[in-house]
Image: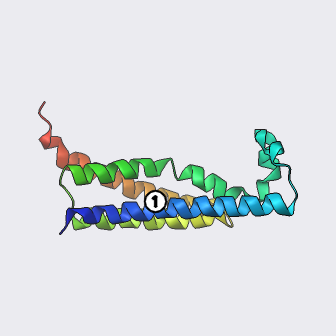
Amino acid sequence: MDNKIIFLPLFAQVSLTAVVWIWLYVTRLKEIFSKNINVQDLADAKNKRELLKKVSGPSNNFINLFEMPVLFYVAIFVIYNTGIVSSLYVVLASIFVGLRAIHSLIQSTYNTIKHRFAFYLLSSLILWLIWGMIITENINMINW
């Protein structure tokens, strides 16, 4: 197996982030133009929350994509650079991205917390499993 395959889930996560970023700006701009909002009014955080409340889902999700997924990005590079790439890591990383994609869809649309949290929790558990495996496989490589 080519070790570079571990980057496919990473590229998918970056693509998800790009899609949410585009969705964020399309929905915001549409809202700004349809309500004829003075963009300077958005400089104040409270005004921004109120004026763009209807389209806050993609924005909130975009922020969320720079929380737990940061640990995912680091994990992928650790897996690759320590040479421990395996089919299991690729599958787990792909599952993580799939769960995050569903989480993003829920948060950016109907945003029912119990649904969103289920996918957040599952994706987080997968990520912690990946990190547990990384630590277990690399602990012996460290010279104390």
Q: Report which residue position mark 1 lands on.
A: 14
Q: Can you tell which quarter of the image residue 105 is in?
A: bottom right
What residue sits 40% from the left and 62% below the top?
A: 11
What residue sits 25% from the left and 53% below the top?
A: 79
In this rendering, is residue 21 above or below 66? below
Quarter of the image containing the N terminus? Answer: bottom left
Q: How many marks?
A: 1
What's the residue type where badge 1 is placed? Val
Q: Return the x and y of residue 124 as percentages of the image width and height.
A: 44, 54
Q: Return the x and y of residue 70 as percentages of the image width and height.
A: 43, 48
93 to the left or right of 16: left
Quarter of the image containing the C terminus? Answer: top left
In this rendering, is residue 54 above or below 132? below
Question: Which residue occupies the foreground of this view, 121 or 105?
Answer: 105
117 to the left or right of 90: right
- The residue most toward the right is 36
Q: Return the x and y of residue 143 as percentages of the image width and height.
A: 11, 33
Residue 112 shows in the view: no
Q: Return the x and y of residue 3 as percentages of the image width and height.
A: 21, 62
91 to the left or right of 118: left
- The residue most toward the top is 144
What residue sits 86% from the left and 53% below the top?
A: 37
